[in-house]
Amino acid sequence: MFMTILLAAVTLLQGYVLWRVAGARILGRRIPIWALLAGVGALWTIFLIDAFAAHGAAGPLAAGLELVAMDSLAVVFLLAVCLLAVDVVTGFGWFAPRRAPALRGLAVLAGLALAAVAIVQGVRAPVVVDYEVRLAGLPAECDGTVVVAVSDTHLGSLIGPRWLDARVAQVEAIRPNMIVLLGDITEGHGAAAESFLPGLRRLSAPLGMWAVTGNHESFRRAGRGPDVLAEAGFEVLHDRWAEVRPGLVVAGVDDLTSRRRAGLGGDPVAKALVGRPPGATILLSHTPWQAEEAARLGVGLMLSAHTHGGQVWPFDLLEKWLYPLMAGRYRVGGMTAIVCRGTGTWGPRMRLWRPSEILRITLRAAPPG
């Protein structure tokens, strides 16, 4: 059903771009209609094959089809955004009938330029982003604890073991005291999750390695993704807490988005926190929801992900309706919430404007009172 709806949306989007580009003048010339039809038809066919045949398959051919399908979808989207802006300004050509073709040509060039920037940004190495968080109840001996958070790597068909090895080297260079994975570590299709075990097993931290599941690890096709995390040495927190050391607790919940889609009731945040010992608490939740409840229950730091920061602008403007905590640092009651933009990408290997990231969080003991 999802793929059918997506294919319908892609068809409408490509149709709009074809309609507006057909009358555009790019560098003073019109693109032949046969060339436009051939290009759009080829992209539509590739997307159709990927959606209903190649998606979920392993191998370089399936990966290549998915890369072209996903990246071309983002390029067409950016073209549509730029062309729609021109249409709004010119009243779809009514206000400036003579200038509209040239303006549409400029819109096409602007869309292609944005796509080029997004491709470069999407494949570059994630940056390390630093935060310092004061936690009430954190013991003095835990002051200066460094927590590294990684999320949304989507290891699978488009992001493989070599990419993971480079990210492991980045994390090792930080020398963290704790490592946390915030979900969607595996994509759920493409390369088998077991192929990423050697890289994940290279990670270590003296205060442990902790993980929660994301929506991709909750899919039926996720296979052994969650099991692989455990086999790699991560303790997966399924709606429960664990004491890292006296005075420092880490808790985690299974993906809240997946729970809502499945119509599951209950209160996973409260369940994950009940009965924990006194001290500072860090909550791991893939989806950045129920932050107010976490703050009310005494969580000092909530780490989330899932949104990708919108990944390709202007999706972030749309996503904010569903996820008010989109990316970066927030203050919710007396709690600090940090939402990771993602260490990898989902769908298109593209990002506009902000790069992927690895979080380095230094914990500080709050002063008395």
Image (spheres, rainbow, N blue to C red):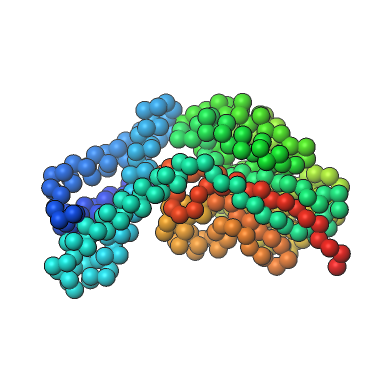
Q: Position of residue 160 (x, y in %)?
A: 50, 31
Q: Is residue 35 left or right of residue 322?
A: left
Closest to the observer: 216 or 280?
280
Q: Quadrant of the C terminus?
A: bottom right
> Residue at (49%, 53%) from the top-left corner?
354
Determine the residue positioned at 49% across, 64% down. 321
Say left or right for 330 vs 221.
Answer: right
Task: Give the residue at x 23% y 70%.
Answer: 90
| Number of residue marks | 0
User: Percent position (x, y) of residue 225?
Assistant: 58, 34
Q: Quadrant of residue 292?
A: bottom right
- Residue depicted at 75% across the width and 53% down the height: 363
Q: Which residue in the rendered view is the most extreme toward the bottom?
A: 95
Whether residue 230 is visible here, answered yes or no, is no
Is there any visible trace of residue 311 in the rendered image? yes
Q: Position of residue 70 (x, y in %)?
A: 38, 42
Can you say whether 284 is above or below 60 in the image? Answer: below
Q: Nearer the viewer, residue 117 or 202?
A: 117
Residue 341 position in % (x across, y down): 55, 51
